[in-house]
Amino acid sequence: MYLIKRLLFGCIVIILCWSCGPQVHNVTVQNPTDKSITFKVGDAEPIIVGPSQIKQVKVNFGKQLMQVEGGDEEEINLKPGKKYLLNPTKSSYIYEEVVFTDSRSAAFARHMGGTRIKMDTISIMGLPIPGHYKQVNDYVIKDFDYGPRDRIPKQIKISSNQAVKVRVRTEEAFVQEIMGILKEMDLKEAVEE
């Protein structure tokens, strides 16, 4: 009986120690530049991200300091249950709305837009672009549904007339898509003429 109590007490101590330690979270890191970058979060080992590389790293939850290339430290705060993208280069990222709708409300959705990002005008290469967009260049990119590697599904199950999701990607990827759409429009116009 004494042995069982000691084993039970030992198991409880191990569980308590494990649950009180720092919680680790897999976070995506993107380096959209053409140079490698080294950064560290908290007391962890330095992380090297190669040029144009996206990778998963393990980072503790909570408030901690992030330091890039041996420069100044900046406090970041990662909370459990959220999706994050670390941006050690402080590159420009664009949040945009993705609206899923049933066929009856498609025309309404095109005119009204979404509801998670307020209507704003962002500047890309000096050109103003109005829409439900938000431009950021923070170390921590958060509050999004689809990141740089995520594919946007063609359809999702919605409970009302529409569902609004948020996509985040680099400014360069955003510009490439716009250029592709413009090229496609030019080809369609040429075919119609």
Image (cartoon, helix red, strand yellow):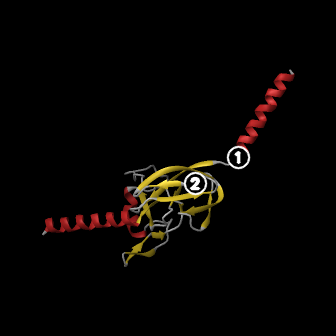
Taking the view exactly as shown, the residue that stands out farthest to the left is: 193
Residue 27 visible, this orientation: yes
Quadrant occupied by the C terminus: bottom left
Secondary structure of the residue carrying numbered label 1: loop
Give the tally of numbered discs.
2
Please indicate whether residue 2 sits to the left or right of residue 155 in the image: right
Residue that carries the numbered disc 1 in the rendered image? 21
Residue 39: give x, y in percent of width and height.
54, 59
Q: Amino acid at mark 2?
A: Lys
Q: Is residue 149 above or below residue 176?
A: above
Pick whichever of labels 1 and 2 is earlier in the sequence.
1
Rendered residue at 64%/54% (across/down):
43
Q: Are marks 1 and 2 in contact (CB under 8 Å)?
A: no
Secondary-structure class at tag 2: loop
Q: What residue is shown at x 46% (from left), y 70% (from top)?
A: 135
Residue 162 visible? The answer is no
Q: Is residue 52 above or below residue 179?
A: above
Distance of label 1 from label 2 (alpha carbons): 19 Å
Most foreground residue, 39 or 93: 39
Disc ID at residue 177: none
Q: Is residue 74 left or right of residue 134?
A: right
Q: Is residue 148 placed above or below 190 in the rendered structure? A: above
Q: Quadrant of residue 177?
A: bottom left
Quadrant the N terminus occupies: top right
- Residue 178 x, y percent position in the rendering: 32, 66
74 on left or right of 165 = right
Residue 24 falls left or right of residue 7:
left
Q: Which of 32/171 is in front? A: 32
Disc 2 marks which residue?
Answer: 82
What amino acid type is highlighted by mark number 1? Gly
In percent of width and height, residue 29 lies at: 49, 55
